[in-house]
Amino acid sequence: MDQARSTISKIFNGEPHSYTRFNLTQNMEGDNSQVEMKLSSEIDEETGGNGVGGRLNHNSNRTPYVAQKLGRTPKNLCFIAATIFLIFIIGYLIGYLVHRNKDLAPTCAPSAFRYEDIPHETGAAPLMDWDDVKKLLAQKLTTSSMDAVLGQLSSSNHRAGSPGDEDLGNKVLKKFKEYGMKTWTDEHFVKVQDPPASGYNRIVFKNGSEERPTGFLSYSASGTARGAVLYARYGEEKDLKQLKDMNIDMNGRVMLVRAGRISFAEKVANAAKVNASAVLIYPDPADYSIGESSPLFGHVHMGSGDPYTPGFPSFNHTQFPPVQSSGLPNILAQTITTGMGLNILRQLGGRAQPDGWESINRLGDESDVITVEVNNVLTEKRINNVFGVIKGFVDADRYVVIGAQRDAWGPGFAASTVGTSVLVELARSISDMVENDGFKPRRSIVFASWSAGEYGSVGATEWLEGYLSSLSMKAFTYINLDGIVTGQNGFKVAASPLLHSLVQNALKEVNYDKDKSLLSQFGKNNWESTILEPLRMDSAAYPFLAFSGIPSVAFRFNSGSSDYPYFGTTLDTQQNLNSITASQVPQLAVRAGQFAGHIALRLVHDHLLQMDLKKYNQLIRSHVVQINTRVKNVQRLQPQLLPKALTVRWLIMASGSYSRASSALAADIQNSDLEDIEMCRVINDRIMTVERNFLSPYVSPRDSPFRHILLGSGPHTLKALTSHLDSLKTANPDADAKLFRKQFAQATWTIQTCANSLAGDIWSLDNEI
């Protein structure tokens, strides 16, 4: 009896417990991490016994009030024992019922990060084994069927908004309906620039004859510019920096640059930064084997979508006031033929070109004057995007989007026909798998045929702008099919870091031929260095990622080191593509379809989205290390600009918060009892917030549409912060220390916000910052 009284007294009195606090802030300035451990007894000593433990136990010698009131009679002891027994019985019954319900609930894949740990089991919608899914897709996508569709969808004239474009869209829509898909269209009225219908654009070099190029660059400024020609190689920032280092005055000059390496829009934007008056772009024979008289077509909007409705859709019923995108250039831009470019280049005087510029010609001097006149006209066009959907059986309101551009400047066989054909064939194959083979995707697949892609992903971007609030938490991946076959000797992938593990797995499982996978054929040693490349701004996948925060992937078979020479010309024909691929276009298109289909089907088949959150850790850490080093350099060399009070500590801690949050979610997936569909949905929703939360909330979509701080474009990005620090280091007059501090704070909090969202519940947040 004495022993029982002692036990009960301990239950009510309680005993103080120690706890340990860990502070695992990553140390970006070195390789060692810091670990802080603090016990409650130490805290009590620091606070003079007035801590939490001290307050609870400062009257430890007194009998607690509860014990005093109960007393120590046999009657009270029996009452307490009966109560404890009753609680035990209730707890046992609850545990039994919960365990029974778990046995009846559908199971969920145990890991979102390791493919080898995922068993091929079934769930609420009886899932097909993944190996069977792969085999079915390989059986459905055949060379013969692909070749037939390529012939059906080929067109010599399907420029955006033209009758040919509309006819091709109707063909795609009809096929989607034949496959039993739910279909719809999305109509937009967009403003684009076309060459003058009655006049012409022209150039006059020195006192020579007038040239009238038939190619043009949409969204160029209009008017006339006269200035001395300056050869600037590809017009990249590093090229202009070399000219600046040679003390060459670029103010008012007409830049002559080669096509390639970067987009036309980036070339013009770089020239505008150095106050050039105009840009002439020509295809150099070293890069393009298209003859001396073939015209070039393109656009120079440093953005995507309709530049006259930036940030909102071009619906006919909207009442937005007239506005323009900040990405429209304020200088003239015009393409010229190879013959025109070489003729100018041969007559240039002035200084010799810098070493490494692969030319013996000169840069040009003040006497090499040229007149450029651009008279493009602004027109409104009606375009239609075409959609079909295969609905999921569990999370039908979550979907992966597969899209392809439908329009082209000319035949556009590589630019649009191949991608549209693969889109249609994937829709047919997966629809057939669902209807006839018992495949039941958990999530939906949306197939999209875009118009006005040649003007800067206009159709795709207008759709994003029109339905951004609906898409932000429902569309979880975009797969781009534009330009997927431009050669056969190489394979390139550009993707969000979240998709890198999924891409690697697809490379392993998709065959290039009978004996080799895509990975063994093109990425034997280090696939990330040989296959991965940055996502380009002129890709339709870019606005999905950098504007909407939807993880995206684009890929292509290419010819190795050289680009496809016929993009942006009327020579992009089936015959020319066959000559580059040894007439293997249908076979390569099938492999491209299998690669895209593998990624899409994996995302709609598995219970948990196969996205590796830890991939962003390396990218964030790399930026933080660069910023930390540069801040210290500026504080040492220009202390009046950045005081010692400015610290990178908060950015480092935000980076650590994201690292811990991503690791915690991985641990939650491994350790939690994920045996119901709702839990899978909650975890997937946490994964889907990551990309979207990297969009800076502090910049306007009109001024900086690509708001992604890691992969976007603009002064809000971590890359721009690094460049700003370089300018501060040299006391560049364009550098603004106050502006830098503002952007620095905003970028820091964007990363911390992403970490907070990834952590899940509000009580799970890391409040170290």
Image (spheres, rainbow, N blue to C red):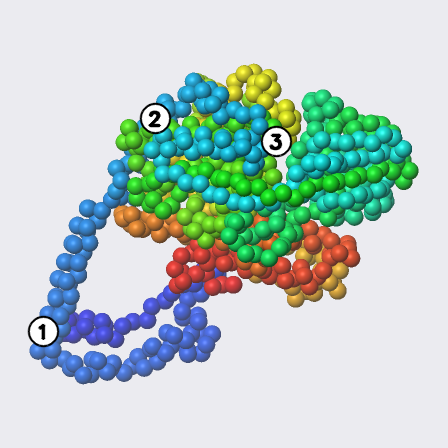
Separation of residues labelled 1 and 2 (CA atoms):
69 Å
Q: Amino acid at mark 2?
A: Leu
Q: Amino acid at mark 1?
A: Cys
Give whichever of discs 3 and 1 has the lower sequence position: 1
Instruction: Residue at 73%, 41% (x, y): give it.
Output: 375
**Is 385 drawn above or below residue 466 in the view shown?**
above
Separation of residues labelled 3 and 1 (CA atoms):
91 Å
Q: Nearer the viewer, mark 2 or mark 3?
A: 3
Residue at the disc numbered 3: 409
Q: Give coordinates of residue 22: x percent, y percent.
A: 45, 60
Label 1 close to label 2 by CB (< 8 Å): no
Q: Secondary structure at mark 2?
A: helix
Residue at the disc numbered 2: 136
Residue at the disc numbered 1: 78
Q: Amino acid at mark 3?
A: Trp
Which of the 4 quarters of the picture holds residue 700? bottom right
Circle 1 residues within 10 Å: few <14, some 14–19, many ≥20: few
Q: Give coordinates of residue 605: x percent, y percent.
A: 35, 37
